[in-house]
Amino acid sequence: MPGFELFGEEERQAINEIFDSAGGIVFAHGFDAMRNGSYKVREFERDFAAKVGVKHAQAVSSGTAALKVGLQSLGVGPGDEVITQAFTFVATVEAIRETGATPVVVDVNDTLNMDPEAFRAAITQKTKVVLPVHMMGECAELDEIMAIAKEHNILVMEDAAQALGASYFGRYAGTIGAVGAYSTDAGKSLNTGEGGLVVTNDEQRYVLARGLHDHGHEYSKTKGRGEESAICFGFNFRMTEMQGAVGIAQLKKLDFIVSRQRENKAKLMQRLQALPVTFRRSPDPTGDLGDTIVFYLPNRDLTDKFVAAMRAKGLGTKNLPDAIGWHFAKHWPHIMNGNARYEGKCDSSWMKSADLLERSVAIPVMVKMDDARIEHVASTLIAVGREVL
């Protein structure tokens, strides 16, 4: 993690092909006579859908766009409530607000994903969708979440932006709920620079998502693009042919990326058992993406000292704690203002999550870590533990 580690000749050739044999058309639509049958975004969508085992994939301009389009394809709008979790990237809550719906944010548990019982407790008559987030490559407890949602007739949409390639008991993250959203930005396991995908097995939701991402276009089979009608109010969340071409090349490397991350994480975890810490709980260890190791320290003071000692020895962290401000709702009064549940209450609303997150240390696992690098990271962390704990 991320896919840029494996950027190489394949991605270069994929982009060059657009200019060498596809007429230099980088727009995903039209120009049929010039592009010699080359439609890279459409090809990427087909390949991605086949890879994760869904009927439909709609490529969009970002993971944030995927979240908004996915929610709207489920009919989310003003007057609705969408339940999501306190530990996520800020885009999850931004997307809910962009639909006009009200975000209801619940605590995470020791998986650092949605606490199913916190979800249950937050349900009201206005709850339309639950949006669990598979943070840092680990899936949420979907069996429990899906069961609660079914009991209350609530739609499930998965935010798999940080879990592209992860699985939950044999099924790819993002493919289990009614709709799934992925990110393919520069920090993800599949990298197109910017980009995202919405996936679903429902034909009507796919058609709506396709229109929503492209000014409402109906994608007529008999009329030209300029003559066809709109099926809905939409916006421009289109992916370019260059992103699609890179996505095709990257997708072919995904299995290797995931396999190598898992191997490297297993090696690191074996060495880190010497640390007197508690590791993040995994609902399905075999499906973990393998790009992050998270452990909890006894209290916040020790966590601060541990991370300071890591940095002094040249090691960094991944989101926890270095980017916690962008990944924990406690720090988002600018988003929560106007929401009666959280106005002026961000500091006190998610105490269970705060206790876990503010004692967490997240270690990145890279594809190209060799044994020497793994040993260096492990021995440094163990040395820090002996010094601080």
Image (cartoon, rainbow, N blue to C red):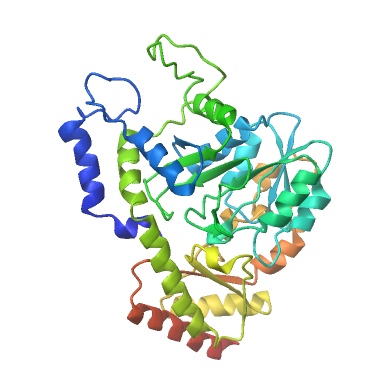
| Residue 343 visible in the current orientation | no
Give the side of residue 77 with respect to residue 362, left or right.
right
| Position of residue 310 measured from the top left corner of the image (x, y, whole percent) | 48, 78
Instruction: Pick whichever, 12 or 329, lies toward us.
Output: 12
Q: How many marks?
A: 0
User: In which image quadrant can residue 315 be found?
Assistant: bottom left
Q: Is residue 39 above or below residue 150?
A: above
Write down the quadrant of residue 115 in the picture.
Answer: bottom right
User: Residue 214, percent across and down?
Assistant: 47, 24
Residue 271's place in the image compared with 290, above or below, is below
The residue lying furthest to the bottom in this view is 386
Classify 80 as above or below 306: above
| Residue at left offset 44%, top offset 54% | 188
Question: In this rendering, would 3 be left or right of 76?
Answer: left
In the rendered image, the quadrant that contains the N terminus is bottom left
Residue at the left extreme of this rendering = 20
Residue at figure coordinates x 19%, y 33% from the top left:
19
The one nearer the camera, 181 or 112, is: 181
Q: Is residue 318 above or below residue 155?
A: below
Q: Position of residue 84 (x, y in %)?
A: 68, 48
Instruction: Determine the residue positioned at 55% across, 50% down.
Output: 160
Q: Quadrant of the rendered structure where residue 263 is?
A: bottom left
Quarter occupied by the C terminus: bottom right
Please say whether residue 33 is visible from this viewpoint. yes
Q: Position of residue 373 (x, y in %)?
A: 36, 78
